[in-house]
Image (tube, rainbow, N blue to C red):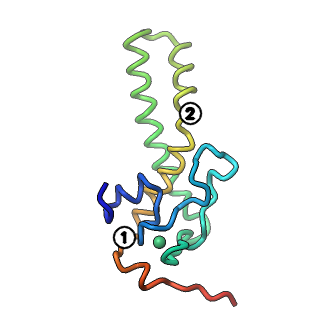
Amino acid sequence: MIKGTKLYSILKFKCPRCQEGDLFIVKNPYRLKYLDKMPHFCPECGEDLQKEVGFYYGAMMISHATTTVIAVIVHLIVFYFYGWEIAPNVFFLIVVILGLFPIIFRSSRAIWVNMFINYNPNAIKSKITHEKN
Ligand SMILES: [Zn+2]
């Protein structure tokens, strides 16, 4: 995968500015206790990853769209085997959506933050420092 692209940052859950620092404190998305734990500032380049209060609310729109696409795909596959039977549809939807939830959640946040911050190859050299008052 080519470093410097948005796709790299999104798929590897890396800071969109330097693409070195991790977007999430714990890498494994299935450790649900830490699912939404992100550093306030990128540990490598100092980029502000929490632009404002409620910044990641917008990621819910991406999550919603992704979940809808996945639900349609699951339904089409189940429809091929079971037709309009409701029970298998509901069962497979719940299993797939719940199973993928941590990945959808995190990739939605990664896509969202990538919409606002661009890659800068010199980001680490020009690290932003945050003084505590
Ligand atoms: Zn960074």
- The C terminus is located in which quarter? bottom right
Query: Across the whole image, how many numbered discs are drawn on residues?
Result: 2
Decide which of tag 2 and tag 1 comes sooner along the chain. Answer: 2
**Residue at 42% across / 66% down in the picture?**
19
Measuring from the top left, give residue 24's x and y in whole percent. Answer: 57, 59
Callout 2: SS: helix
Q: Which residue is mark 2?
A: 99
| CB of mark 1 near ligand 1 (< 8 Å) | no
Measuring from the top left, give residue 97's x and y in whole percent. Answer: 53, 33
Q: Nearer the viewer, residue 13 or 82?
A: 13
| Image quarter of residue 51 | bottom right
The correct choice, above or below, for 30 with respect to 27 in the image is above
| CB of mark 2 near ligand 1 (< 8 Å) | no
Q: Nearer the viewer, residue 66 or 123?
A: 123
Callout 1: SS: loop
The correct choice, above or below, for 30 with respect to 86 in the image is below
Cα distance in 3D space between marks 2 and 1: 31 Å
The correct choice, above or below, for 37 with respect to 52 in the image is above
Q: Which residue is mark 1?
A: 118
Give the amino acid at mark 2.
Gly
- The N terminus is located in which quarter? bottom left
Q: Nearer the viewer, residue 83 or 4?
A: 4
Give the amino acid at mark 1.
Asn
| Image quarter of residue 52 | bottom right
